[in-house]
């Protein structure tokens, strides 16, 4: 009997812990991960735009809490610097793509290793079981970035061989037109090139002046700064189309050459009363507002502008951005010997703050997660924006408006704005404004080039 009892004990004793666990007397020790709090700042999107992508990230990273804050674009850099100084600034912040180099002084470049804990929670007889793993996650390199994103992205976020941020959305400039105004002028289709535009404005009656030569109806809003959204981008895009290399590899500004002068003169011709293409001036209200009111036939704007235009009630359409046309004659001295399909992107880049050094790997992991093709759709659907990823962008042609912008982004080009992008923008604006008061175009270009080169 004793022998039998010993045998039974040998069999049952190892099972006791299992029985105790099953009955709940002993609870298995759960794996834990230290909590991480990330703060994200942006100027264009509400919290609802990020709620879906944050929820998806938390499925495998429940220990991470992400707080998004939409702040004013006014004095944005000052707000960031003050917040970081007070230890209340964001871990991830979105800035205009031209600011990447400027903000690199306050940022951390992407590390090669983005490995962070992944938590998997499964249901068991006892409730739930938590398993923590740390599978290695290698960060994308420059080659991978150039292959996945449209070309303009790589030009902006890769500096010195390092990756400084990721965009999650993309936009660009295209040509909006008022269908009724074109019909009234007997114009059958929107302008496809800059020569087309000049003809529509100057000889086909799109611009209407009264007896005092005041503008009653504008053919296109162009040639000014204060009342023209994207003015400097339109001008520099026109320069690049005309063969200008804005900044060379050695950091020398090159736009003050003859091609740059001709592009500036052409841009300004639409706001110069003595020119045949005159159709706009600095006394007019905001260009987009005037287009929405049906007082401007053509408006150069972004996909984001379509939301307000759709609500206006006017009949409109959108077509590709204007380009030079090698098949047409000379356009006010512009270089029409070759067609240059160069488009200007409008987008923001997410960066990781230097003040977040202790959380930088987790912040970069989340930022990279947001930019991935498998995760970005919820954000893109919430905002109606386009993707900077070629794989996703190719699928965003469901409606005519998006199709125009999506197809253009493959030929979007940007240029190096140096470490003081805000000043660069200001110098270009001042250059255009000086022409309104009679400054010599050649001298205005030289001054702007000298000022900008000093910031690079």
Image (cartoon, rainbow, N blue to C red):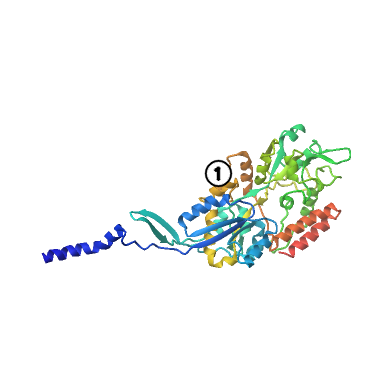
Q: Which residue is drawn at 77% across and 54% down?
A: 260
For the N terminus, give its image quadrant. Answer: bottom left
**Residue 44 placement, left or right of 133:** right
Q: Which residue is drawn at 77% across and 63% down?
A: 451
- Residue 394 in view of the camera: yes
**Residue 356 placement, left or right of 433:** left
Residue 291, percent across and down? 74, 41
Residue 123, percent across and down? 37, 53
The residue nearer to you, when weighing 309 against 187, is: 309
Q: Which residue is drawn at 63% across and 67% down?
A: 86
Q: Is mark 1 on a helix, strand or loop?
A: loop
User: Relative to residue 203, is residue 346 depicted above or below?
Assistant: below
The residue nearer to you, when weighing 344 against 338, is: 344
Q: Name the residue under label 1.
A: 395
Residue 170, percent across and down? 62, 50
For the C terminus, give its image quadrant. Answer: bottom right
| Residue at the far right in the pictured view | 212
User: Relative to residue 388, is residue 1 depicted above or below?
Assistant: below
Residue 384, percent across and down? 60, 45
Residue 252 in which image quadrant: bottom right
User: Relative to residue 318, is residue 247 depicted above or below?
Assistant: below
């Amino acid at each position: 009997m004793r022998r039998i009892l010993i045998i039974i004990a040998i069999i049952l004793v190892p099972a006791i812990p299992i029985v105790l666990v099953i009955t709940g007397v002993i609870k298995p020790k759960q794996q834990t991960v230290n909590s991480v709090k990330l703060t994200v700042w942006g100027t264009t999107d509400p919290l609802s735009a990020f709620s879906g992508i944050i929820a998806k990230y938390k499925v495998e990273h429940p220990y991470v809490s992400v707080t998004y804050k939409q702040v004013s674009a006014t004095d944005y850099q000052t707000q960031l610097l003050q917040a970081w100084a007070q230890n209340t600034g964001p871990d991830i912040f979105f800035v205009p793509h031209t600011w990447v180099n400027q903000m690199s002084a306050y940022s951390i470049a992407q590390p090669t290793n983005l490995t962070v804990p992944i938590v998997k929670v499964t249901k068991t007889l006892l409730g739930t079981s938590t398993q923590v793993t740390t599978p290695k996650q290698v960060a994308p390199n420059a080659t991978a970035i150039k292959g996945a994103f449209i070309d303009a992205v790589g030009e902006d976020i890769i500096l010195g061989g390092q990756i400084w941020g990721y965009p999650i959305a993309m936009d660009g400039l295209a040509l909006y037109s008022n269908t009724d105004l074109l019909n009234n002028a007997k114009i059958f289709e929107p302008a496809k090139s800059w020569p087309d535009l000049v003809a529509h404005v100057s000889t086909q009656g799109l611009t209407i002046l009264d007896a005092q030569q005041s503008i009653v109806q504008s053919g296109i809003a162009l040639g000014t700064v204060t009342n023209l959204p994207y003015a400097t981008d339109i001008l520099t895009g026109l320069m690049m189309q005309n063969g200008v290399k804005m900044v060379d590899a050695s950091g020398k500004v090159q736009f003050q050459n003859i091609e740059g002068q001709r592009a500036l003169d052409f841009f300004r011709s639409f706001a110069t009363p003595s020119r045949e293409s005159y159709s706009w001036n600095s006394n007019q209200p905001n260009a987009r507002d005037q287009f929405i009111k049906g007082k401007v036939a053509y408006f150069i704007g972004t996909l984001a502008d379509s939301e307000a235009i759709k609500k206006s009630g006017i009949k409109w359409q959108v077509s590709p951005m204007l380009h030079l046309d090698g098949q047409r004659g000379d356009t006010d001295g512009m270089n029409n010997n070759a067609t240059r399909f160069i488009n200007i992107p409008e987008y923001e880049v997410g960066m990781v703050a230097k003040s977040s050094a202790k959380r930088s790997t987790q912040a970069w992991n989340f930022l990279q997660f947001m930019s991935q093709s498998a995760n970005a759709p919820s954000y893109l659907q919430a905002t109606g924006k386009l993707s900077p990823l070629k794989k996703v962008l190719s699928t965003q042609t469901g409606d005519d408006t998006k199709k125009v912008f999506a197809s253009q982004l493959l030929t979007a080009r940007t240029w190096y704005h140096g470490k003081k992008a805000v000043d660069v923008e200001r110098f270009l604006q001042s250059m255009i404004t000086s022409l309104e008061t009679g400054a010599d175009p050649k001298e205005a270009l030289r001054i702007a080039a000298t000022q900008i080169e000093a910031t690079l």
